[in-house]
Amino acid sequence: MYRMALMALIADDLPGINRERCIKIALVHDIAEAIVGDITPSDGVPKVEKSRLEQAALNEMCEVLGGGKRAEEIKELWREYEDNASLEANLVKDFDKIEMILQALEYETGKFQTEIGKS
């Protein structure tokens, strides 16, 4: 999330893209995972159930944040990302894929291994 927001921050200006909105989408796109975890296709959870769990988690997070105007904005940004409903959401999805590749490369090259993990 943080690295994706940085990608949005430093990306060149693109026609028709609202950079501030990209940063906000990047920051909230995984907010539900704080409660439900990262549900992947290999977990065998049907899409409808995953969506229900994440929506409930998002609602819970927004309640914790006190509700109101900002909570509604977070819900709107999250839904925009989930539905791939804008150019900004599409770009942030691309950033998410790039971030995943970078993370895999870092693990593969041993950047995060301890001496015990190397043996």
Image (spheres, rainbow, N blue to C red):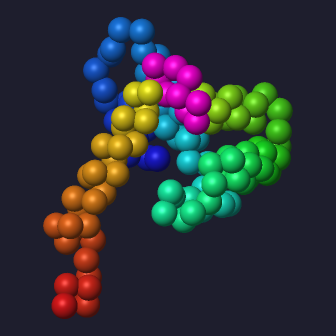
Front-lying residue, 39 or 20: 39
Q: Is residue 115 above or below residue 71?
A: below
In the shown orientation, is residue 55 left or right of residue 30? right
Residue at 47%, 23% in the rendered image: 88
Magenta stretch encompasses residue 82: yes
Q: Quadrant of the C terminus?
A: bottom left
50 relative position to 65: left or right: left
Q: Position of residue 75 (x, y in %)?
A: 70, 34
Among all residues in the image, which is located at the extreme top?
15
Image coords of residue 6 (percent x, y): 37, 38
Quadrant position of residue 77: top right
Residue at 69% across, 47% down: 48
Q: Is residue 114 visible?
A: yes
For the question of whether residue 34 can be seen, the reply is no
The x, y position of residue 114, in whole percent, is: 26, 82
Q: Is residue 10 magenta?
A: no
Q: Residue at x 26, y 85 (%)?
A: 117
Q: Is residue 91 above or below residue 113?
A: above
Labels in figure, total? 0
In this image, 118 relative to 82: left or right?
left
Residues 3 and 79: in front is 79
Left or right of 26, for residue 50: right
Residue located at (83% from left, 32% from top): 68
Span highlighted in magenta in the image: 81-89
Q: Position of residue 62 (x, y in %)?
A: 76, 44
